[in-house]
């Protein structure tokens, strides 16, 4: 049985459906992420799990029991807010003890449970330090110890790394994965950053306008996006207008309008005549000199229209016959070399017959 189950959850604000018929089942021990652009309903959904807000329709089950009527302080969940908000005038131990003190627990119990929580996050040694005297990663551990001290079944984290600069954020992400694994507690994590979601999560629910577009593991979301929104939101993607002209058990023949026909992997429900988009990742596109031998079934000659050098890789925008543009990614493995092809150069782009996917309209 799932630890947390959301069934047909809807929340309206006037005319707006901030959360629209959402179904999610989260397993114990999972690092589960709600990912979507700002305003898509992530915080609203998290607040309903915490009990700070009520759905207009649907039910929330924990261990199979409906917790819809349970007040927030009775729910075995704990919400962690942005930037962790530690009290600067309290020591690490006092910060962790704070929720128990507020709940009026006896001193002996507080001492035992604070020690237990600090041990879980390996901060026993730093108990008497002040927040200013510990590193960013350690502050994150203090905040998590404070969240764990009430022994919740799950932690709800609403963009906790949102305010950090890129380098620190990456370090904290690595820490957070380790912490979740060590403590083994279920995380429901909210972010609008797709690289962050891919790096951290066991599974991700991609949200858009209050609805769930797809729930899957990071690699399946990236490799097998179910629709245009997911393909576009997760990583970079070439999306080319396509019509199905032939189907077999193993592959599709697609007409890419001005470009002509290509072969693509079979898609369960694709029918001849169906319109949609062909989604192809830039790293799946091979780019070579036009004269080089080509053994792949999909290949076209075009001109480099533009390029974007970002250090480790260069993205080439190749203009193909009929004006269609395709992005191709190439690693800069030769030291000091920023580009292999120049703007205006004639090149060949090619991709495997089993690369990319057809996304019906
Ligand atoms: N209390 C509220 N009253 C009216 N509209 C709200 C309220 N809370 C959120 N909204 C709206 O609901 C939508 C979803 O908001 P939110 O859940 O905060 O999105 P996210 O966290 O994904 O950025 C937004 O359009 C927001 O303006
Ligand atoms: Mg939010």
Image: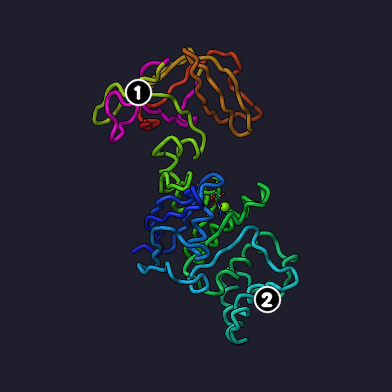
In front of the other: 345 or 241: 241
Residue 129 within the segment the image draws in magenta: no
Label 1: how many residues lie within 10 Å, few (<14), some (14-19) or many (20+)? many
* Residue 343 to residue 58: above or below: above
Specify the farthest residue to the front: 14
Q: Which residue is mark 2?
A: 94
Q: Quadrant of the N terminus?
A: bottom left
The residue sitting at 45% across, 53% down in the picture is: 202
Query: Which residue is at 55% across, 59% downward?
Result: 157
Q: Nearer the viewer, residue 266 or 46?
A: 46
Which residue is located at x 46 percent, y 51 percent? 19
- Residue 221 image point, x, y percent: 43, 43
Left or right of residue 68: residue 167: right
Question: Helix, strand or loop at disc 2?
Answer: helix
Quadrant of the image containing the C terminus:
top left
Q: Disc 1, ligand 1: is the CB inside 8 Å?
A: no
Q: Is residue 249 left or right of residue 149?
A: left
Q: CA distance from mark 2 to mark 1?
A: 64 Å
Q: Which mark is residue 89?
A: none
Q: Which residues are magenta?
A: 258-287
Residue 243 is marked as: 1
Return the disc, 2 or 1, that comes first in the chain's sequence.
2
């Amino acid at each position: 049985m799932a630890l947390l189950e959301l069934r047909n959850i809807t929340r309206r604000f006037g005319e707006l459906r901030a959360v629209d018929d959402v179904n999610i089942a989260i397993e114990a021990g999972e690092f589960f992420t709600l990912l979507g652009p700002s305003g898509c309903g992530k915080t609203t959904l998290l607040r309903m799990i915490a009990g700070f807000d009520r759905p207009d329709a649907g039910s929330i089950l924990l261990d199979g029991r409906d917790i819809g009527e349970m007040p927030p302080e009775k729910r075995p969940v704990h919400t962690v807010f942005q930037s962790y908000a530690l009290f600067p005038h309290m020591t690490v131990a006092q910060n962790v003890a704070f929720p128990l003190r507020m709940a009026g627990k006896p001193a002996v119990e507080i001492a035992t449970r604070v020690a237990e929580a600090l041990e879980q996050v390996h901060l026993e040694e730093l108990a008497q330090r002040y927040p200013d005297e510990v590193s960013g990663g350690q502050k994150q551990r203090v905040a998590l110890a404070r969240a764990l001290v009430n022994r919740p079944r799950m932690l709800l984290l609403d963009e906790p790394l949102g305010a950090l600069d890129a380098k620190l954020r990456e370090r904290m992400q690595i820490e957070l994965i380790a912490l979740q694994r060590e403590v083994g507690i279920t995380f429901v994590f909210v972010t609008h950053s797709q690289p962050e979601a891919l790096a951290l999560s066991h599974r991700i629910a991609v949200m858009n306008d209050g609805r769930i577009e797809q729930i899957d593991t990071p690699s399946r979301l990236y490799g097998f996006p179910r629709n245009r929104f997911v393909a576009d939101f997760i990583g970079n993607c070439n999306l080319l207008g396509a019509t199905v002209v032939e189907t077999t058990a193993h592959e599709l023949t697609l007409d890419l309008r001005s470009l002509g026909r290509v072969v693509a992997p079979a898609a369960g429900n694709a029918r001849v005549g169906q319109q949609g988009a062909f989604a192809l990742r830039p790293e799946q596109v091979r780019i070579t000199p036009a004269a080089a031998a080509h053994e792949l079934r999909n290949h076209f000659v075009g001109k480099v229209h533009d390029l974007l050098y970002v250090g480790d890789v260069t993205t080439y925008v190749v203009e193909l016959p009929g004006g269609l543009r395709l992005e191709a990614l190439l690693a800069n493995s030769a030291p000091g070399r920023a580009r292999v092809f120049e703007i205006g150069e004639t090149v060949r782009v090619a991709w495997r017959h089993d690369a990319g996917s057809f996304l019906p309209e």
